[in-house]
Structures are given as C-alpha cells and as structure tokens.
Image: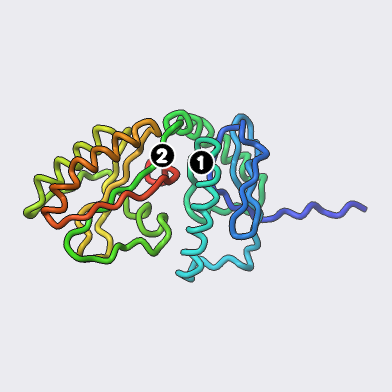
C-alpha cells in the first residue's frame, strides 16, 4: 500500500526568471530553492506551521531579516520580484494556480526591474541616533508611499533640490513616511540602474557641503531588492 504524499506548507519569498531554477539560497540555517513553474521560478521553502508566530513582534522581525537575506542572495545572480513578508500556502500545488493568475504580471515586473536595485536615502537633522536597528522590510519598506514629499522649514529648498536631483537619476522613487525619530527629516527609496549608482553618489556628494551647513546628515542604505517598487 502506498503511503499518502505528505504536503507541507510552503513560504514564498519572491519570483525570479526560469534560468535560476535549481539555485539554492541558505538563510537561518535553512535552504530556499528557486523552483521552476512554467517559464518562471519561485523562491520557496517548506515550513513548519507549529513554529509560525506572526503575533510575536520579535519573531516577525527575525522573519523579515531572513526574507531580506534570501532575496539579497537571489538578487546577486538575477532579477527578483519580492513577495510580501510571510506569504504562505498549504502546499506547493497552490503555487500552480498562483502562477496562472499572476504570471503575466510577474514577467512584466521582471523585465521592468532587470538590472536595477533599490537604494534608500535617509536625511537627519542635528545631533541624532540613526534608526537603522530593525530589518529594512520592517523599518522602511512597510512605510513607503508614492505621494510626493512636502518640504518645509529652513532646509526646504535644499531638500527639494536634493529630491529632484536624485529622482532624475532614478527609474522610480517612493517617499518614506517619517520614522519614529524626531530628527528624521526626509526619507526616500530610489530604483537605480547599477550603472547610475556612481552618478547618484556623486549627486549626494555635491549637496553634502550645503547639507552640513544646514545641520543635515545623509545616509545611503542599500542595495536592496526592489521591495517598494512591486
């Protein structure tokens, strides 16, 4: 008598091109695999739902860190379309239907994001402690919006020019809602072609002298998978 096939729950981290099928990415001591589904590949791993505890903030922070590491490793070998944090299915069969309903969207996203990385610019004012202790997914990606920033105060003109200069070099931009830090002035994510990164850094350097005179400090955070552009 044949034993029934055991179907394990599956976590989806993101989508990559079919050429990456078979690749493995290790994080948190566990292996995630790029598995072919049609002409795409999904980065997945089996999970134990008994260990699943999304109500625990520390557990969620750890999962966000693992999610980032998996996709950052995948990003080094190809384009990635990130999935939402903690996207889980009862078994792999459900992924077939997911590909049927989302395949065209994912293929277009892979083409649009090819050769690009997400970089995040943080601007602080005055003496401060940077809020960089949480994983990027928890700290930044969840608070990104397409709404344009409103510039106020004595540094408004400088910040407006800085935002325009950065946006001109990027394929897309997102404003970050203010982090829970009273010294956080401005934040934004930028979708950059790798070839534009040197120009982007040079633009920041051009504004850095004026920034110091205004008591501002820049932090450039990246590269990241395009979490805020999918």
- Of 217 and 24, nearer the camera is 217
Residue at 50% across, 30% down: 107
Rendering coords of residue 120 (x, y %): 33, 48
Label 1, secondary structure: give it: helix
Judge from the rendering whether residue 13 lies leftward or rightward of residue 163; answer left or right.
Answer: right
Q: Nearer the viewer, residue 148 or 213?
A: 213
- The residue sitting at 13% across, 47% down in the picture is 210
Furthest-left residue in view? Answer: 154
Label 1 Cα neighbours within 10 Å, binned few <14 / some 14-19 / many ≥20: many
Residue that label 2 marks: 117
Q: How is the image coloured?
A: rainbow
On the rendered image, what quadrant is the C terminus found in?
top left
Q: Position of residue 212 (x, y in %)?
A: 16, 53
For residue 164, which quarter of the picture?
A: top left
Q: At which x and y percent is residue 108?
A: 46, 29
Q: In the image, 194: left or right of 161?
A: right
Residue for point 52% across, 52% down: 69
Q: Are marks 2 and 1 in contact (CB under 8 Å)?
A: yes
Front one among 67 and 99: 67
Instruction: Say what secondary structure mark 2 lies in.
Output: strand
Identify residue for label 1: 75
Vertical relation: 55 (above or below) 172: below
């Amino acid at each position: 008598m044949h034993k029934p096939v055991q179907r394990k729950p599956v976590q989806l981290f993101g989508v990559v091109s079919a050429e990456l099928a078979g690749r493995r990415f290790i994080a948190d001591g566990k292996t995630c695999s790029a598995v072919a589904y049609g002409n795409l590949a999904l980065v997945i791993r089996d999970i134990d739902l008994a260990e699943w505890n999304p109500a625990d903030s520390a557990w969620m922070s750890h999962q966000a860190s693992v999610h980032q590491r998996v996709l950052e490793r995948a990003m080094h070998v190809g384009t990635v379309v990130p999935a939402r944090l903690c996207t889980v299915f009862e078994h792999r069969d459900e992924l077939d239907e997911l590909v049927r309903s989302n395949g065209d969207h994912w293929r277009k996203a892979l083409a649009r994001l090819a050769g690009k990385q997400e970089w995040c610019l943080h601007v602080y004012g005055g003496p401060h402690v940077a809020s960089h202790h949480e994983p990027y997914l928890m700290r930044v990606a969840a608070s990104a919006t397409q709404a344009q920033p409103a510039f106020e105060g004595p540094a408004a003109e400088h910040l407006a020019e800085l935002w325009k200069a950065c946006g001109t070099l990027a394929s897309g931009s997102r404003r970050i809602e203010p982090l829970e830090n009273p010294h956080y002035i401005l934040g934004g994510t930028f979708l950059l072609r790798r070839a534009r990164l040197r120009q982007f850094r040079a633009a920041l350097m051009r504004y850095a002298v004026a920034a110091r005179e205004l008591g501002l400090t820049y932090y450039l955070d990246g590269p990241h998978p395009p979490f805020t552009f999918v």
